[in-house]
Image (cartoon, helix red, strand yellow):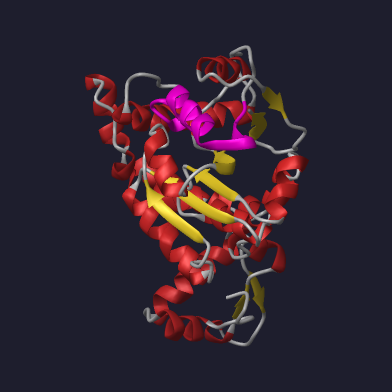
Amino acid sequence: MAAAGAVTAGELAARAAIAPRYALEWLDQQAAAGILDVEDADGSDRRRFRLPDGHAAVLLATDSPAYLLGAAPLLLGVARTVPAVADAFATGRGVEYADFGDELRFGIAELNRPGFTTELRAWVERLPDVAARLEVGGTILDAGCGEGWSTIGLARAFPAATVVGIDLDERSVDAARDHVARAGLGDRVTVVRANAADATALRAAAGGEVTLVTAFQALHDMGRPVQALAAFREVLGDGGAILVGDEHGDDEKAAPAGEVERLKLAMSVLHCVPATWAESDAVVNGTVLRSHTMTSWVAEAGLTSCEVLDVEHPFWRFYRLS
């Protein structure tokens, strides 16, 4: 609608192939909610409705920091899976990630997409030695790549580098491959279905040692996070590093907690814990990855350095591991 300018109910009905009466009903509701502006005209059938630029940034502009379209399908995926989650809490079986449906997978991908497409180079530049090497080549392994927007963002940020995305979810891998192809990056970007905790699989996917391993909003959901970090360490070449961006939280639990932590803990109960439990009951961390947990995992994985990076983000904390 933003690209098309103002439309009447009849014009929208024709474009969307829906009945005009329902188009008008929906437009009136959106206008009453303050989402659409209305241009006055004689007769209700001639009124024109327009999406303001500020609202378009939230609903349509996929590279805008304000883009929040993914929130609606994410919440729908969670809501549809509540009965299975309730059963999981009673039985301890967990709920497979795939069982949360396409809505949740798409919603998570869309919420993270603006950061991946506009901020990712700046995040990697917090590792200046690694960024300099990637400027002239090297390989990036993007663990837990989801629908591939982080993988695409890395490839665009470093045109001389080869990028390999891996994910355990088959539907996510299929979507990521499609996005990579549409982005025209298939000559140096591949996406492989693999377990991040399997060093042999990682090495095979990357074709050898890598310059940088990235894991964005993924480590907290892994059933074997220590083994995954150890696998990352094994595939790193000399001077390589691991960049983790994951959900931050207060080191001391508070009751009541702040609004952001309340949101994360709600998602932990409704999604992250049951999904991780379905993968493995070795470690079920939940959404919030507290700094003392991270340093413990790093030590157990045999890594010797865990540096918190100076990156501003409303939900994540960034680490350089080596």
Quadrant the C terminus occupies: top right
Can residue 276 be seen in the rendering of this structure?
yes
- Which is more toward the observer, 154 or 99? 154
Q: Residue at x 67, y 50 (%)?
A: 120
Image coordinates of residue 92 in percent, x first then y, are 26, 21
What are the residue bounds of the magenta stretch? 221-248
Image coordinates of residue 34 in percent, x first then y, are 63, 60
Can residue 103 be seen in the rendering of this structure?
no
Indicate yes or no whether the magenta region holds residue 229. yes
Q: Residue at x 62, y 67 (%)?
A: 36
Above or below for 44 versus 258? below
Above or below for 154 versus 93? below
Image coordinates of residue 19 in percent, x first then y, are 37, 80
Q: Residue at x 45, y 49 (%)?
A: 207
| Relative side of 47 to 271, left or right | right
Image coordinates of residue 68 in percent, x first then y, are 58, 53
- Which is more toward the observer, 34 or 191? 191
Above or below for 117 versus 234? below
